[in-house]
Amino acid sequence: MVALLLVGSATLLFSCKEELNEDTVAQDEAMMTEYSENLTVVKSQNGRKSYDFTTPLLEGYTLAKDPYREFRKGVKILTYKEDSLAVAQVDVSLVANYAIYYIKRDLWEAKGNVVVNSANGRILYTQQLFWNAKTRRIYSNVDSKIVENEGRNVSYGAGFESDEAMSDWRFRYMTSRMELEMKTAPDSVATTFDTVAPRSTVAVGTGTSPLPAADDSSKDAKKIGDKSKPQK
């Protein structure tokens, strides 16, 4: 009888402890550990400005299983050229209505009117963009648009991927409109061509290497979504 009572007490104690642990984990997941308004962060490397970040609101959840920082009122991120000597020259700028940063994975997700401007004149427009700081790649799984040559060349597509500087970009599927200037005497005539790439064709911005069928980008994208919140 005493043995049965001891076993019962131990089982009850273990169950209570397990429930307490689950409650603690749930509380940690929901606990905000960082908060800041009108935040500006400037990062330098070897005495040169390399990174400039501004946001109206930061909320951090560093005790979560997958620690993250959330920016519900949008972000503006500037990166600078490494070879700039005197005055820091912007290499790439990014603005978005919402962003979330996964600390352990060094992975950013930007959503809502995302615009990326690069120093080479290319502009990317999309509604969702991932930036993997470890691999130094940016990518999107939704419809996107690339504008070049001061708006004369416009490319539309899905399955976008590029390096950080947007010097080597590509779509898995692309519909492209390109405006070419054809000179005739005495006037010049601008002609616009519309082309649709076949579904099996990979269209690239520079170079001819095909886009891999499976990469780390898609794996990262599958992990995103459950923590992201709509913009308020």
Image (cartoon, grey):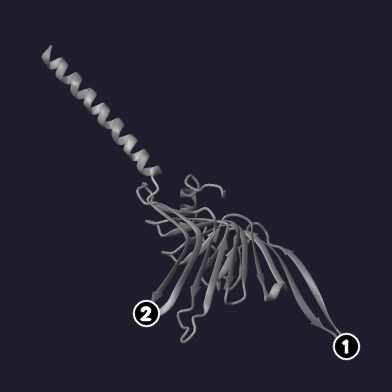
Residue 118 x/y as whole percent: 57, 73
Q: Earlier in the sequence, mark 2 or mark 1?
A: 2
State the mark number for residue 71.
Answer: none
Residue at 46%, 86% in the rendered image? 85
Residue 108, compared with residue 19, is above or below; it is below
Residue at 80%, 74% in the rendered image? 191
| Residue assigned mark 1 | 186
Which image quadrant: the N terminus?
Answer: top left
72 displayed left or right of 15: right
The reply to whether residue 14 is visible in this rendering is: yes
| Residue assigned mark 2 | 46
Secondary structure at numbered mark 2: loop
Farthest residue toward the left? Answer: 2
| Residue closer to the observer: 185 or 229 | 229
Residue 125 x/y as whole percent: 63, 63
Residue 228, compared with residue 52, is above or below; it is above
Camera-near label (2 vs 1) is 2
Secondary structure at numbered mark 1: loop
Farthest residue toward the right? Answer: 186
| Residue closer to the observer: 52 or 211 | 52
Which quadrant of the structure image shows residue 216?
A: bottom left
Residue at 52%, 47% in the rendered image? 229
